[in-house]
Image (cartoon, rainbow, N blue to C red):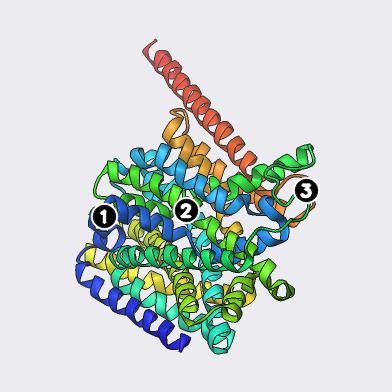
Amino acid sequence: MLLVFISGYLILTLIIGWYSSKYVKTSQDYVLAGRKMPTFVVASGLFATWFGSETILGASSEFLDHGILGIIEDPFGAALCLLLIGLIYARPLYKLNLYTFSDYFRIRFSKKVEIISALFMIPSYFGWIAAQLIALAIILQAISGIEFYIGVILCAALVLFYTYIGGMWSISITDTIQTIMIIAGLIFLAVLFYSKSGQIKLMPDNFWRFIPKENTSTSWLIYFSAWITIGWGSIPQQDVFQRVLSAKSEKSAFNGALISSIMYLSVALLPLFIALMGSQIAPGLLKDDRQMFIPNLVLQNTGLFFQIMFFGSLISAILSTCSAAMLAPATVIAENLIKPLSGGKISDQKLLKIMRLSTIFITIIAIILSFSRSSIFELVSESSALSLVALFVPLTAGLFWKKSNEMGAILSMLFGVISWIWALNYDNPYPPAVFGLFWSIFGMISGSFFQTKFLKDKQQHARQQSRQLEN
């Protein structure tokens, strides 16, 4: 019976996606929903975009294993990111009337920076999408016993369908519905399991500790890395950017981001609370895969109504995250890689077609990656770290440092990514994300000053030659 309800919900999602396609007439409709979204829809979209498998399944397992320090990255870092977007980035970026972050890099720096940023931005989504497909496949396996690989393909096809035809219109409408499902389902379960447990029992030492126990530079760097991996790294991500730009006004973009930050942090605490109560009700389930602790807890300790509420909310969270993550890199491929190759002469309808076809390409890559990896939390973390070391510094410097220039942006991206990859594969006393961020900052400063000095020297040399000719 549970499978029947879940199937019905998935079919409803497909119908909504099909219905939304009638609003898609131009590429702007497909990418930004015509920039007509009110504040609540923007907030719901930003919240639902991030509230996915890593929040309910990944973060809850980290919480049970490591306490508060295990979840600094998500939900605390994720809520910080949305807050910073609202306070610092939403207004100046909304005014530029762009499609993608790479559009910004072209306007602020050069076409060369646009292309390089796109090449780094696109791969950052593969792991993110793969994490959602893994989660959906695991859920289907738990409910129906369907094979994992088949589940991945079925779930990918479902999300691809309504993203392909409806774009941001489809995502915005489904996200608003899914947000309501998520909040309602988690509140019901939190109340149920608290009533069964009755109290929060004594937890291990340092379980509730919010800052590192050891006062060493290494401990604090790891702690800092946890805050910034998503907290800063997800600021220059296209899916978040599209939500902000889909707002009907600058004020709606600003307010939507701030509201989503509050929503995310408060609602994201619910699965952690459910996991904590569940560990006291059914400690035997902790011996199994902890990413599946809450789903198994619900299946074995609740009736059909609560199972429908939970799995409906869980699937809602994952679908919304996955669909936005598919659309974002597809937009970048069409707008910032293929369109420039045509000399900017491509028609809007052809651009729209390329965006849709690009969602298929992105989905295939994510499916392949999902077959080779299994840790939801790690996949999401690595995706955010890549955008942190490659794009955060050029974006922020471009907005707030007038001396930043093309060479600084290019070296920032290259230094950041190369040093991050090196730190991941070799012994290094510093967290890879922090190490990459440091070199990204160094690249921006050194490159910008070098280009400025080079231009000054060139101008001075030209003036000297001019004087010699005059004499």
Identify the mark nearer the N-term, 2 or 3: 2
Residue lying farthest top? 471
Q: Assess disc 3: are there few (<14), some (14-19) or many (≥20) residues with their C-alpha within 10 Å of its C-alpha.
A: few
For residue 24, what is the image quadrant?
bottom left
Residue at (37, 58) in percent of width and height: 45
Residue picked out by circle 1: 37
Camera-nearest label, 2 or 3: 2
Task: Check disc 1 and report its element: helix, strand or loop.
Answer: loop
**Number of numbered discs:** 3
Vertical position of residue 399 compared to residue 116: above or below: above
Q: Position of residue 158 (x, y in %)?
A: 41, 79
Q: Which mark, by number, is residue 428? A: 3
Residue at (37, 64) in percent of width and height: 180
Disc 1 residue type (three-letter): Met
Label 1, label 2: how many angstroms apart (C-alpha)? Answer: 19 Å
Q: Position of residue 337 (x, y in %)?
A: 40, 59
Q: Quadrant of the C terminus?
A: top left
Residue at (29, 57) in percent of width and height: 32
Nearest the eye: 106 or 143: 143
Label 2, label 3: how many angstroms apart (C-alpha)? Answer: 34 Å
Q: Quadrant of the N terminus?
A: bottom left
Task: Check disc 2 and report its element: helix, strand or loop.
Answer: helix
Q: Assess disc 2: are there few (<14), some (14-19) or many (≥20) residues with their C-alpha within 10 Å of its C-alpha.
A: many
Vertical position of residue 66 compared to residue 450: above or below: below
Residue at (72, 56) in percent of width and height: 66
Q: Position of residue 322 (x, y in %)?
A: 45, 68
Instruction: Tell me if 82 is positioned left or right of 20 in this view.
Output: right
For residue 429, what is the image quadrant?
top right
Disc 3 residue type (three-letter): Asn
Residue picked out by circle 2: 264
